[in-house]
Image: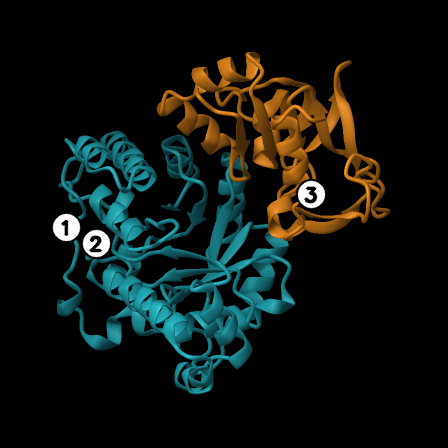
Chain colours: A orange, B cyan
Amino acid sequence: MGLDGLLIPGGESTTISLLASKQKLFEPITTAIAQGLAVYGSCAGMIMLADRVLDGRVDRPSFGGIDIDVRRNAFGRQVDSFEAKLELPVLGGEPFPAVFIRAPWVERIGGGVEIIARLARQNDGDPAGRIVAVRQGRLLATSFHPELTGDRRIHEYFLRIVRGEV
Amino acid sequence: MDVVDATQAKIAEDAGAVAVMALERVPADIRAQGGVARMSDPEMIEGIQEAVSIPVMAKARIGHFVEAQILQSLGVDYIDESEVLTPADTANHIDKREFTVPFVCGATNLGEALRRITEGAAMIRSKGEAGTGDVSNATTHMRKIRGELARLSSLPQDELFVAAKDMQAPYDLVVEVAQAGKLPVVLFTAGGIATPADAAMMMQLGAQGVFVGSGIFKTGDDNPTEAVRNERAAARAKAIVEATLHFDNPDVIAKVSRNLGPAMVGINVDEIPEPHRLAQRGW
């Protein structure tokens, strides 16, 4: 594809999947992922990078690539959106301000998947400890939107993956 | 896309809509039938929430904060405080900062947009004239907002005080917008969009997305069966999505504009008496 890396942003995974098929981008992207393209997916992008999607439409497949089970809208609808500070050891330094909007979470990970962040939030019980950022090889995925806070460390980390530095 | 039942919601989702607006009557019907237009039946909204996996929006009357409370309690993903419904308060809009659900509001100019953002709107749509199929007002409002943004960002610092006064918007927000050259929230367009070309024109004028209301399911057919109507609506919805996506590619827009059947017959905005113009509701 002539790309060093690809960002799959937030949005609606149902719509992204549909439009990727219609625009004949589905096969080129899955092929590029299989060939080792560096890809970062946030929110809906995480869903698109997951090998298995729970609560999604079966006729709207994901690209896959990361050996995880992801639950769509896991935290609830729009009104359940929230912000949280996350410890991300790979970034070091201050906790990362993360914005979760109709966000997915990771329910199960396969062998080659590295957990980048878990939710530490102590609230109604269930979301606490959920996996919200993962990496497998050159693929990176977060449940949250790092672009809404002005903290660039996730994007910088992804650029280091693209350049093969980490 | 505006939808009135689960079938239409699925058509919109399959066409590539990123959200649906759950309504009992689309604006064209509200206009035709008259009377007071209110929030939709929660039962109907929930039916649509269950039918689709994309976000569901719903409308509350301008200033009707209890309708907004109900919609928030239903878990809708966005509330449209909308001039398409009959305003419930002739002076105040809803204090949207009191809610966790985000709001979208209409605006005909930059000052109106900034007042809505101050009240807590998370998204602005230019108003247009809903339910007409006449895109001229949407064009006017998008050009107006775009022009005022350009003018504001060209003003020297010491003229921003008067600019804030003239626009009846808070000074700090005016300064922020003048520096950024754009709104601090997303700007969509709405009202009178009936064809793929209409949608693409709004995008070329600077909209970041398009609301399509009556234009999908109210096409200009002479009493088709429901199946035929839904089939045509699906084709039109898909075409409008494609045109919005490829708004700067006339070849694609030309291709998707073929064989869509008659667009909604529509009403020329000029022929609507002033008191019945929806875009003038809200202030």
* Label 3: few (<14), some (14–19) or many (≥20) C-alpha neighbours in 10 Å: some
Relative height, residue B231 to residue B182 (above, below): above
**In front of the other: A87 or B193:** A87
Q: Are marks 1 and 3 on the same chain?
A: no
- The alpha-carbon separation of the residues under discs 1 and 3 comes to 53 Å
Query: In the image, what residue type sits under mark 2?
Result: Gly
Residue B282 in view (yes/no): no
Q: Tell me whether the residue at label 1 lies in contact with that at label 3, contact meaning CB atoms closer than 8 angstroms.
A: no
Q: Nearer the viewer, residue A112 or A132?
A: A112
Q: For mark 3, give the secondary structure.
A: helix
Quadrant of the drawing holding the N terminus of chain B:
top left
Q: Specify the amino acid type for callout 3.
A: Arg
Element type at mark 2: loop
**Residue A54: image tag:** none
The span from disc 2 to disc 3 (Cα, nearest Å) is: 46 Å
A136 relative to A30 in the view: left or right = right
According to the picture, the residue beneath numbered tag 2 turns out to be: B133
Residue linked to disc 1 = B265
B18 displayed left or right of A55 = left
| Circles 2 and 1: CB atoms closer than 8 Å | yes
For disc 3, the marked residue is A153
Front residue (pair B63, A110) = A110
Q: Residue at x 32, y 49 (%)?
A: B212
Name the quarter where the C terminus of chain B is drawn: bottom left
In the rendered image, residue B259, in percent from the top left (x then y), is placed at 14, 31
Which residue does the image show at 52% across and 43% down from the upper left?
B55
A93 relative to B65, above or below:
above
Pointers 2 and 3 within a single chain? no
Name the residue located 74 percent from the left edge and 26 percent from the top edge: A107
